[in-house]
Amino acid sequence: MEKMSNKKGTSPTVPPGQDPDGAATDVAATPQSLVTQELVEIALRNDKSPNAQLVSWECRDFTRPGDNYACVVSSVEVDYKEGGEEHHVTYVVKLNPCRHMFNEYVHDVFHKEGLFYRDVVPELNKCLREAGMATLSVPKFIHAHLERNKEVIILEDLRPRGFKMFDRKKGQDFAHAELILKELGRLHAASVLLQRQNPNTSLLERFPFLEDLFLKTGAQEDETLKTMFANNFAGAKSIAESTPGYEHAFGWIENFSPKAFEIMCKEVLPSSAALTVINHGDCWTNNLLFRYNADGNPIEAILLDLQVSRTCDPGCDLSYFLYSSFNGEDRNANLEDFLDIYYDSFKQVLDAGKTQVPYTRHELADNFGDHYMFGIMMGMVFAAIVLADSEDVMDFTKIKEENMEESMQEWGERTTKVINKSPLAQSRLLCLFDELVKRGEIPSKE
């Protein structure tokens, strides 16, 4: 057998099982140290064949600050032999960030995503194939290691197929949005087909890990989570306070932000069985990839990062996407067309599967309207996250639970800094304030 090589990025600076002072801990020293030869060999066999022989492997980071938050995304380059010939393949690896905080939440999101790829996607794809439809546009799942504090998910590397991220500092345009809305419609419809196969057992009963993370026992009582969420509105408050005519918006945000986490938890509760579908849960620019033709036009989209997938109303996914990833003018000008695109895609799958469509286009619009506040919240939160430069991104590896209050203050200051130096972020927020005025949440600025 060939000598193995893990040439870069896989050796911890501190031995696993110890912290820098030598005390026992279950958290590895670095995310890259979680990638082991055994995991690479399992991935290779799963992806290629039991006869594939590992020759060497190497971790290579390729993402930038601001691209990922709940995990670390890296890649593993693998040389192997099969059938007497040498080959090369690269995998994307999602790694526990090893931050020594929020370990339970990190485990939950990895557990959810790993099981979603492993257990849910094959069932949804089976339903789509039986209806004569294409399977979901998600990465090929290779392997998931879900041991607590050592979580690793290994997926297909989509870069060789030409997929790349959309510039998060630009609002999504119509051509990109059309691809995503069609795919959301197919995802939601596939979950309806799956539910109809066993109508007496809900999808949540069948896949308990689809429970929303913030609805789990204890999450709603977590004061740290509430404080973190409230601090995300610091930038919005700053713009409202400093922009003439938006003083009422400042007062509204000041009153709203401490309650935002509680409101979010209510928003993701399913309103009825008829409206319950499997949601992506985190559908925004960073979690989408696109492939382009020779003219630079998007022709295919991939949904990524299913770490907060859940069962809830379609309006949650739609409002999350349309308020987090668009400039206000583009969203407002095309909203009815966007809902048409989604609904036509949703209905097409169910018609092909000879299944009754559970809600009308009018009911969809009502459901989207019922969840607009969820979208407004996400839009305010993401205005800073989406548009932050690398130097302004919070380094969560340096946060310690004992100085959480100080860290949350810094997070609020960084959010405000990003907003104040970004005309695009300010424009997005003012559009959100105007929508709150239109919907009667805050008084008119006149």
Image (cartoon, helix red, strand yellow):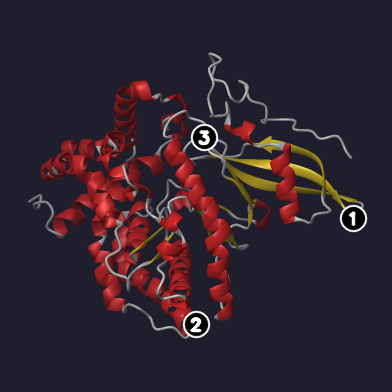
Quarter of the image with the N terminus in it: top right
Residue 78 vs residue 126, the one in the foreground: 126
Q: Amino acid at mark 3?
A: Pro
Q: Measured along the vertical axis of the image, is residue 354 above or below residue 68?
A: below
Residue 446 vs residue 319, the one in the foreground: 319
- Secondary structure beneath dot 2 equals loop
Rendering coords of residue 221 (x, y %):
26, 40
Give the residue drawn at x 32%, y 64%. Answer: 315
Q: Amino acid at mark 2?
A: Gly
Q: CA distance from mark 1 to mark 2?
A: 41 Å
Q: Amino acid at mark 1?
A: Gly
Q: How many C-alpha atoms fall within 10 Å of the one at disc 3: few (<14), some, or many (≥20)?
A: many
The quadrant holding residue 3 is top right
Q: CA distance from mark 1 to mark 3?
A: 37 Å
Residue 198 vs residue 120, the one in the foreground: 198
The quadrant holding residue 249 is top left
Mark 2 — residue? 353
The quadrant holding residue 26 is top right
Q: Are marks 1 and 3 in contact (CB under 8 Å)?
A: no
- Specify whether 330 is left or right of 174: left
Q: CA distance from mark 2 to mark 3?
A: 41 Å
* Label at residue 329: none
- Specify whether 50 is left or right of 100: right
Mark 3 — residue? 97
Residue 166 makes an appearance in the image: no
- Secondary structure beneath dot 3 equals loop
Mark 1 — residue? 83
